[in-house]
Amino acid sequence: MATAGTEGLIAIGAGLAVGLAGLGSGLAEKDIGAAAVGAITENPSLFGRAMIFTVLPETIVIFGLVIAIMAIFVM
Amino acid sequence: MFKRSGTGNYAYMSARVKAKTSKLLKEEDYNKMLMMSVPEISHYISEAGYSKEMNDLGTRHAGIDLLEYATYMNMSKQFRSILESANGELKTMIAAYLTKWDFENLKVVLRGKNYGLTPDMIREDLVIAGSLKEDDIERIISAPSIEDALAIFKSKTGLSVSDEAIHLYKEENVLTRIEDELSIGYYKSVLDSITGKDRATNIFRTYIKYVIDLKNIETIMKFKMENVDGSLAADFFIPGGAQLTDKIFAQANAAPTIEAAFNELQSLKVFEELKTMLSQTPNISLLILTMERFRLKMAIQVSHTYPLSVLPVVVYMIMKEDEVKKIRTIAHGINSGLDRDTIKNLLVI
């Protein structure tokens, strides 16, 4: 059973896992999003593919979220 | 390789120009066009991205004129849209590169004024693809004298000419000196605008330096082919080239024959390309064609490297310019009754 002190640390860890993963995704999506908008401007039919490429880095946040959930509910 | 070079919206611009590049005409399109008449070519290119310009100009022009104006108008629009969408250091580099068209337009205006053409006639030959806005160009066209036109151009682009050149124009009514000084100023301003130190920007810088070399070789060859005294050539030298120094330039100009001048250029990278030209009868159009092939080859070689840099944008602009030249060459060739093989040889495919 985690004590009050360790619970706090787990919460900080979970927050960092989601926060840093989100930051990483944001950085990755910045250029992909800009390139996607550029491509769609020239050829609107690329919207679907551009969208998929733009959201690909979101998977990193899911990893972060899984770690956060594991930290809170499993540890 | 994917490192961003300097400030600017590289990812956005790169994606846009890659999409634009994919829409450019391919070799098989040119082969098809070679089998067509001028109206058929007009119809064909209408379906290949030039429809708006063809429709806009269709009421005022016809035949080869329509094709010429429509292709140039389309190119202008594409270049302007690229320039307007870019920002930061990238925009500065693109704007400096596109000053070439401002400089070409100024030449058209000066020559037009010199020969007493009407503003409407001058306007027809302009390609508004540079960084100057239409209002600025209108001001240059309506300037009362050539000095005033040059003053407006200087205030907008920073390119100026010496008092000597203006004096020479007033005395002898020749624009050559003014045009040469502007040309030297243009290449200097492009090189000055390329400030980045990364590899991609260095490739762009090297490309511009090679273009300067090619321009200098063109000067040497024109002097030799026309048998003009080589000592007069020094004023036409454009500094800042990659390999062709003022020393080699002077030596090549001092050479007694065209073959001897070629030998002086043996140390240059472009020499291999020129050698093939020397095996045929050298003439100015063949020389310019060889240079164009070399320039395009250099551009295509780097087109897929460094996506987040100025390179994809510049390569697109070079390829678009080449596309317009090819369409015009085919149309003019067919219009003048040249056979298909001769026209094909004139294309830089």
Image: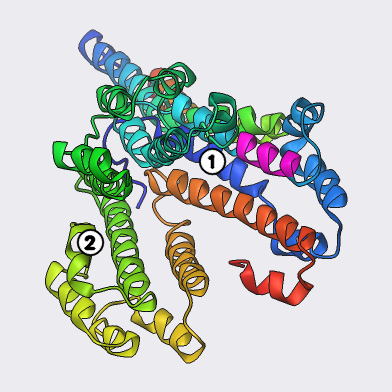
Residue B196 screen position, x and y as percent: 22, 43
Q: Residue at x 36, y 42 (%)?
A: B97
Say if the magenta span includes residue B199.
Answer: no
Query: Which label lies toward us, 2 or 1?
Result: 2
Which numbered circle lies on residue B17? 1
Q: Position of residue A4 (x, y in %)?
A: 24, 8
Q: How many marks?
A: 2
Q: Classify mark 2: residues with Cα within 10 Å, few (<14), some (14-19) or many (20+).
A: many
Extreme top residue here?
A: A4
Residue B318's place in the image compared with B234, above or below, is above
What's the magenta region? Answer: B65-74
Image-quadrant location for residue A70? top left
Q: Secondary structure at mark 1?
A: helix
Q: Mark 2: which amino acid? A: Gly
Closer to us: B149 or B189: B149
Q: Residue B213: give its label.
A: none
Residue B22, above or below A11 = below
